[in-house]
Image (tube, rainbow, N blue to C red):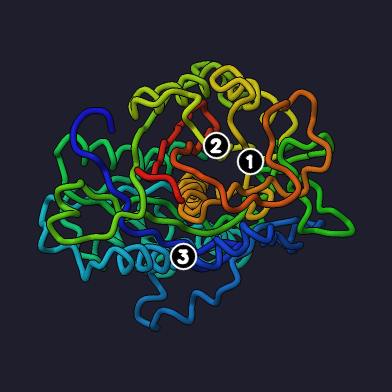
Amino acid sequence: MRHGQAVFITGIGIVSPIGNDVAKVAQSLLTLRSGIQRIDAPPLARSYPAGVVDIDADAHFDALELPYLDRCQQLAVLAAQQAVTQAGITDFSACDERAALYYGNVAGGSATRERCHQQLLCEGRQSAAPFAAMAIMGNAAAAQLSIRHRIRGPVHTFGSACAASAAAIGEAARAIADGHIDIALAGGAEAPLCAGTFFVFEGARALAACDRNAPERSCRPFAADRNGLVLGEGAAFLVLESSSHANKRGAWELARLAGYGIAADAFHVAAPSAEGQARAMRAALQDADYLAESIDYLNAHATGTPAGDAVEAAAIRSVFGDAVPVSSTKALHGHLLGAAGALECAITVIALRHAMLPATAFLAQPDPRCALRHLTGATQTGQRLRRALSLSCGFGGTNVALAVCMEDPQP
């Protein structure tokens, strides 16, 4: 960041519909393998496309742990462990209050909450299971990670809708750059694939119809024939630390979190504003001390909704013109709600490290209202990339942009 210490990314962990570790996610981006499939959500009558994580998360936890853990927290624990392991950390206890945890989530323990509603309203039970509250609460994963990794400093949970985990990463980086902490585990998790979540999004008229012939093609950001978003589940975490702390312990720098911008639309609780999104991107560029023309790739928020994608495209044009290559990887993994920003920031780092420009899958015919320098067809490899931006925009009008870089472009 422009002021204070440089912020290194020293670990990345991912559990997602397109892979349950960084290497598998990178391969899916290269081949444009979709993790979206058709699922049922009884008692709702129709099927839905959804980004599903291919993992039996229960199998990773013992019988004493499971009562406390909704699937959301299970995915968070598994992704965070990858990040911590890659960073070469046993636990954070030696850092004492100088280690922190920043977590983004929207729906909390969706499956547990839905099961409690079923027991109360349909089965007539008079009380929930003893530990249901601990599995439902929005900060449950933050609590679990703090305990498991002995993180004793600040522990924050962010709930700013689809920008939640991006804000968590940005605020963690800012706290490190300003010298308040030395190291942080930052990211988000979401497991919203339950009837209640689909029911709510049905009411908002936001969900895509399932493609009859190819469910994996149901999410089509920026496309002329897009018809809504596709929900997804998963978790992603980064280990962030100050350059001095990382150098002292000999940590390997994967990339740098160079800039953070956050701005509110102050416009409408559901309808987005191009001006608010543009302010967030400009703030990130200013924080990183980057010119717009120096950005090599932009991972867009674009969810596939008719109105949202057009507004975001206008925001991107107002900042970058048609100079920056743009794609939305939600076409492959769906919309992870509170975890979307963390996953897409991690994907942006993967793109830099693998010298590739991921394409927006299934973008055969871009909507003229979404005119941008779209990456279509196939993922481009062998690129000389140095700087990239990830944009996340949430219901309620919170927008977050994260600038990441590798100091030296690939040869």
Quarter occupied by residue 73? bottom left
Q: Amino acid at mark 1?
A: Ser
Q: Amino acid at mark 2?
A: Leu
Q: Amino acid at mark 3?
A: Leu
Percent coordinates x, y for residue 289 in the rendering: 34, 25
In the image as oriented, which residue stretches furthest toward the right? 213
Secondary structure of residue under mark 1: strand
What residue lies at 34% left-to-right and 42% top-to-bottom?
A: 257
Q: Quick one: label 3 or label 1, which is nearer the N terminus?
A: 3
Query: CA gap, disc 3 to disc 2?
Result: 27 Å
Percent coordinates x, y for residue 24 in the rendering: 55, 67
Q: Is residue 182 left or right of residue 137?
A: left
Q: Mark 3 highlights which residue?
A: 75
Towards the viewer: 134 or 305: 305
Q: Quick one: label 3 or label 2, which is nearer the N terminus?
A: 3
What residue lies at 73% left-to-right and 43% top-to-bottom?
A: 376
Q: Give the number of the mark in front: 3 or 1.
A: 1
Query: CA gap, disc 2 to disc 1?
Result: 7 Å
* Label 2 Cα crowd, 10 Å radius (few <14 / some 14-19 / many 20+): many
* Label 1 Cα crowd, 10 Å radius (few <14 / some 14-19 / many 20+): many
Quarter occupied by residue 237? bottom left
Q: Is residue 142 left or right of residue 57?
A: left
Q: Is residue 38 left or right of residue 268?
A: right
Q: Mark 1 highlights which residue?
A: 327
Percent coordinates x, y for residue 252 in the rendering: 28, 59
Secondary structure of residue under mark 3: helix
Give the position of the N terminus as an image quadrant. top left
Q: Are marks 3 and 1 in contact (CB under 8 Å)?
A: no
Label ID, residue 298:
2
Asked if one can make out residue 108 in the rendered structure from this viewpoint, the answer is no
What residue lies at 40% left-to-right and 28% top-to-bottom?
A: 284
